[in-house]
Image (cartoon, rainbow, N blue to C red):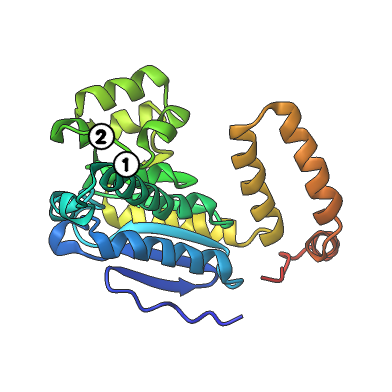
Amino acid sequence: MSTAIPELSTIAIELNEGVAEVHLNRPQRSNAINEAMWQELRAAFAWVDATPAVRVAILGGAGRNFCAGIDLAMLAGVGKTVAHVDPGRSREMLRRVILDLQDCLSSVERCRKPVLAAIQGACIGGAIDLVSCCDMRYAAAEVQFSVREIDVGMTADVGTLQRLPRLIADGIARELAYTGRAVDGQEAQRIGLVNQLFATPELLREGVRTIARSIAGKSPLAIRGTKEMLNYGRDHSVADGLNYIATWNAAMLMSADLEETMVAMGERRPPRFLD
């Protein structure tokens, strides 16, 4: 399959040694998510998912800030987008718009490859929705998180209220959603929102690349299966999860990756896996 990187207007992608770096690329607007970026996020992670040469992805933001959330110009134009002479049809259209935006972000979670978020500067509003879809979150020490929707008079509707309470304590998630207050890097690490803090954005990038390269060196089939099981187990009972992994490994366990691992251990060398 071709590894040709898609040409996108708001997102930049690089691929090196199995690691795709996906960067929100509107630094002049603090990477605020406009209409094009919503759709291009889905396109980018569909490419990550479908490209065998990609084993893991890093999601970052160009410039000083990771992401300032939804572009307010887009938010202000929603009324015009869904305008209809019939209020019922207008509201149906708005529901479809919201569901589509949800799906754009859910593409990160659906992606079979692990996605590591590297977060610096501001991570506000819709950016929380976005990083909540990632497998792991890492941040520079000066980061600022905020569930800001409440401060513009709306209920967050593209994932934060559904995913954040699964990442941090429910009461803390509610406090952040009700107050909109800022969370700095130290608190974000303490409450479990981020896995690790790095002193500077430069150290953040290098640290996350190191973690991503480590993941890229593992069996791609086993990594994809592990993500599938973790996501499934989050949303199902333990019994359901055990049943699913039994079925999965009945199909996937006896793979070339398992054989290569055994051979590499005997030869005292790193394994070399197919994409």
Residue at the image position 48 percent from the left and 82 percent from the top = 4
Q: What percent of the width, then of the height, locates residue 75?
A: 18, 49
Helix, strand or loop under label 1: helix
Give the quadrant of the N terminus. Answer: bottom right
Q: Which mark is residue 128?
A: 1
Q: Is residue 48 above or below residue 142?
A: below
Q: What's under tag 1, amino acid-wise?
A: Ile
Residue at the image position 19 percent from the left and 50 percent from the top = 85
Residue 140 appears in the rendering: no
Q: What percent of the width, then of the height, locates residue 57?
A: 48, 60
> Alpha-carbon neighbours of circle 1 within 10 Å: few (<14), some, or many (≥20)?
many
Cα–Cα span, label 1 and label 2: 7 Å
Helix, strand or loop under label 2: loop
Residue at the image position 33 percent from the left and 32 percent from the top = 188
Q: Is residue 183 above or below residue 205?
A: above
Q: Are marks 1 and 2 in contact (CB under 8 Å)?
A: yes
Q: Earlier in the sequence, mark 1 or mark 2?
A: 1
Q: What percent of the width, then of the height, locates residue 43?
A: 43, 67
- The residue singled out by tag 2 in the image is 147
